[in-house]
Amino acid sequence: MRCLNCHQEEIPSTAEYCPQCKIHFPSLLRDVLAQETLLRNQTYRLDYALGRGSFGITYQAHHTALNEVFAIKEFYPIEFAMRNQVNQSVIIPDNSEHSYRRGLQRFMGEGRILAKLNHPYVVRVHDMFEDNDTAYMVMDLVKGRTLRYILKKQQGNRFSLPKVESIVGQIVEALTAIHQSGIYHLDLKPENVILTPENKICLIDFGAARQVIDSRRMETRLFTENYAAPEIMTGGELGPESDLFELGMMLHQLLTGKLPPPAMKRLNEHKNWHPEGLIAPWDTLVMTALQLNRSDRPASVREWWEAGFQSLQERNGNGHYTVAPTIETLRGQFPLSDLLQEGMQKRFGRGVIRKVLTLSQDLVVVIAAGGATLFQLSTAKALWEVDCPVDCGTLSPDHKLLILVFQQWVYIWEMSTGRLVQQFQGHEQPICHVVCSNQDQLFFCGQKSEIVTSWDAISGESLKQFFKPMGAIAQLAVSGSGKYLATGSLDGNVYLWDVERGREICSLQGHEQSIESLVFSPNEQILASGSRDNTIQLWSIPTTKPLKRLKGHLDWVKNLVFSQDNRLLASSSGIQDKSIRLWHLSEGQEIQRFQGHENTIISLDFCPQNRYLVSGSYDQTIKVWDVVQGKEYRSLKQHHNWVYGVACSPNGKRIATANNDRMIHLWKVTDGSEAGLLEGHRDAVTSVAFSPDNQYLLSGGWDHTVRLWDISLGMVVRTFSEHTDWISAVAISSNCKYLASASLDKTVRIWDVSSGWLALLGNKSLRILKGHLDQVTSLAFSPDSRLLVSGSKDQTLRLWEVDSGQEIHNFSGHHHNVKCVAFSPDGEFLASGSWDESVRIWHIASQKQIKPSFIHSSYVNTLAYTPDGQFLAAGGRDGLIFIWDVLSGKQIHKLHGHTNRINSLAFHPQSGELISADQDGVVRLWRI
């Protein structure tokens, strides 16, 4: 049985209530015509009811002679209609007869309008007749769901840009045909658009429609206030611009998950409204469609649509393109719309390198945690940037498509325009590897999964699945022609597949441990596999015979790449080796070795003509190696790894990040560019804090030291080195008298610097605060500088008096490491975040927890109050940021976009924007 209210399928026929929407079935079905009911002189037989609304009931039926299936809509206004249970006729009370007749005329008018239309995106009416004292409309049976239903199932109640473009483009075609027929729909909304399983739309419900000759008639109009144009509600003249307004409302909803303010509200409030968080051309399309004056909107829906995309294709920073750009000539920054819709404003740092792909001797595409960048190696300039969270990615062989993957999601960018053209879930598990064939066929393997999925990159359609129940798949390779797929598993076996048939050809056995790398030679005659057993195996294709076994690496073989002339194979290994080895294939001998990276090499690629080899490493450098001369040719460092701490200067102009590369990076808030480096720590920097006067910066690191920097000079002016273990947190009091540091040595130390920042009075701590039973992980001064709070791995937070160094109170209640603490801006409350996945609020005066815990989805690493204290943000190990309204306790935001755990949060003191830093080296600025 099917619920007519929510459309839930496969409900037991004995059910009294719908398990989905809880509606009472006997009441819902009371007036529904029974199955096998015959209509129009036994021409149509009803199969079952499909749905019902305020003005009618829709049935599936079939033609008794032709056996064709149709949808039949019965006019049945639920407000006053009743069913005669004897002869099935509709009974209308006398006092409702006039309203009923007027509604019936509208219903018949809708049928006549639809009968004039013959368009693939408009529901087609085949017949109309009167029976049972009401009217029936016989239409095509459209399989699918309404956009309203589908939207509710989407994350954020919105669609991806490619899907929005597809849906709205079809609606534009439908409206163009309708308007050319002299008809206006006048009730466009997601409920009136059906989306089929083939992603085709169908416009329905023309009950409010008007013909051109009726556009000035003053009579009661049907409309939906949240979508309707002003002239529809005020009795003004109607036109195609009226439909465009409703389409603009829908477009904004499909893009953001939210409706703009209704037209009448905007009219009454006299406020200028502009869409937020939309990129070109969507911002222009929405704004143009939602002009309150009908004359200010385009009269042609198609011209409106085409003009928006034409302006995008023609624009660049200096004017207009004369020819379509390519991946090499494209310029600009292209952020993922999902990030903008969540409020992301800027990105500081590109994050850790994932993959390096060469276009020429001087141009490389670097895929990193924060997105993808085209670099010119000779100048170290970034020519274009795609801002998108990335776990892995690649380019199509023709370099026309950029494929980026984050968790299970796949984002495909068209590199002639920088537009996102496809977005879909590529696997049930987080995707760990992706490859692309010359036919733009994509293959994905998921973490700890035995399934490889394949998709068409152009259409975004799922193709096949390759399943091997013997072990999780760790690596993939596809031959250039797309004929063969190779999968490497954790059990050390390599499996060769026939892609067209989706069948396994054979298993290649020879490695003793997990497969770490796979690659086909350009001529498809050799498959190379690298393993955790430190060896490389060459296999003949298609015979699958083992050819040679290459030995020499001292660690896992992480990367393999063939030269384009099929003569050479380059390989790289893990951190115990850090070398690149060059092998002559015909001889099976190592002929060259390149060394210079300081960490694991994670990507290799030959430049065209095979003269140069490019490598990317976890040391965050990109190196170019001269294969002929056997030496390093060029090096580039434009990426950063782990960010442990972040702080914003009190004047809001600069952001400081504490990085694993032993440096403190300074960034301009205005444009996101790097403004300077502070070098001096001998190991990773863990935390940073600005002085209230913006002149100094305090830092702590793994080298057990706390350092005070003069920012303008870029120099250390004081070094404090009494701690005996890593520094986990630092802070400066608001009165500029005290510095504080927390350490894994279980102590908190306070230094008095009230006699002047630069006075060298000795660097001994004023007080050592002892009491924690385990590592101290966090600390914060109260706004009035009188108190200090510290959090510890001992699951407590302790409140100290700064002047005396005495412990005031020990707050307990967490069940795991207390990782972060913060004072509310008014100094009355404490917030603490723990690895027990909770955030707790404590009232200082009463020394009690005052609210139920806020629950995160993972370990809480960091938290921060907004400057006004209204909201509290917490970042977790899963990369998510939760934001709660402190007073109500309600979660108001959940921010995605980071690829690794959130290590630090801070709010901009003036704008209230949130700054977040993650373990993959990406810092983002969000508008809350």
Image (cartoon, grey):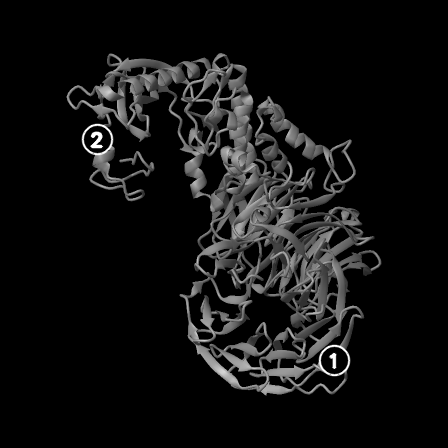
Residue 102 in which image quadrant: top left
In percent of width and height, residue 452 lies at 51, 48
Q: In this view, does 558 lie above or below 809?
A: above
**Mark 1 — residue?**
756
Q: Do the residues labelled 2 and 1 touch (CB within 8 Å)?
A: no
Disc 1 element: loop
Helix, strand or loop under label 2: loop
Q: Is residue 588 visible?
A: no
Q: Residues within 10 Å of mark 2 (few under 14, many from 20)?
A: few
741 lies left or right of 179 = right
Q: How many labels does the image show?
A: 2
Residue holding disc 2? 30
- On screen, residue 291 above or below 701: above
- Quick check: 761 above or below 545? below
837 displayed left or right of 582 = left
What percent of the width, then of the height, locates residue 120? 48, 21
Residue type at numbered disc 2: Arg
Camera-side residue of 204 and 36: 204
Quadrant for the N terminus, please. Answer: top left
Quadrant hosting residue 402: top right
The amino acid sitting under disc 1 is Gly
Residue at (34% x, 20% y) in the render:
103
Task: Give 520 or 622, whichever is nearer the viewer.
Answer: 622
